[in-house]
Image (cartoon, rainbow, N blue to C red):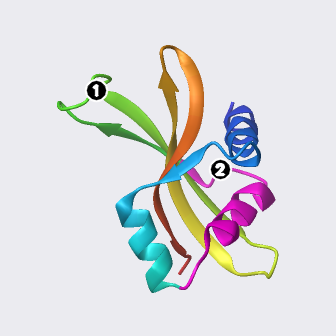
Amino acid sequence: MRSDILRRIKRAVLAGNYVFSEKALIEMEADSLTELDVAESILNAVAIYKTVRSRSPFRQQRIEYLHIIQSTNLDGLMIYTKGKLVEEAGIERYYFLLSSKKAL
């Protein structure tokens, strides 16, 4: 199951169908990471590190799954990302990155 999700995430990233949250952009800037660094890290991933369930009464879908990926970019820098696959009108559209920073 997780490998199928990772494949879908990688396809979204390869197609350029991903967006960064404001928080992710701030984290990237603080760590001197580029969008390419983050994309390379996701494409290099061999597995999803962890999937967590997030709940909020303010969303239409109250439960969503956030996927955590830790992998290196092409320069060997370990990068942590957390994001979700987003659907619009029942069709998977893109991967939304909530967090992107150097892994500890």
Magenta segment boundaries in residue numbering: 32-50
| Residue 77 within the magenta-colored segment of the rendering | no
What residue lies at 71% left-to-right and 35% top-to-bottom?
8
In this picture, residue 70 sits left or right of residue 60: right
In this rendered view, identify the residue nearer to me: 16 or 99.
16
Disc 1 crowd rating (10 Å Cα; few below 14, some 14-19, many 20+) is: few
Residue reaching furthest to the front: 16
Dot placed on the residue nearer the N-terminal end, 2 or 1: 2
Q: Work out how far the residue at label 2 is from the one at label 1, CA to CA, in angstroms.
A: 22 Å
Which mark identifies residue 62? 1
Magenta span includes 44 = yes
Q: Quadrant of the N terminus?
A: top right
What is the x, y in percent for residue 30?
44, 84
Q: Which residue is mark 2?
A: 48
Q: Are marks 2 and 1 in contact (CB under 8 Å)?
A: no
Residue sitting at x 39%, y 73%:
26
Residue 101 vs residue 69: left or right?
Answer: left
Q: Residue at x 55, y 78 (%)?
A: 102
Residue 89 placement (x, y as % from top left) = 48, 14
- Judging depth in this view, the residue of 78 and 96 nearest the camera is 96
In-front residue for pair 11/47: 11
Which secondary structure lies at badge 1? loop
Residue 22, quarter of the rendered image: bottom left
Mark 2 element type: loop
Compared with 76, 84 (above or below) is: above
Residue 13 image position (x, y, % from top left): 69, 48
**Based on the displayed image, in which of its 4 quarters is residue 73 positioned?**
bottom right
In the current view of this chain or complex, which residue is farthest to the top?
A: 90
Q: Is 101 rendered above or below residue 68?
A: below
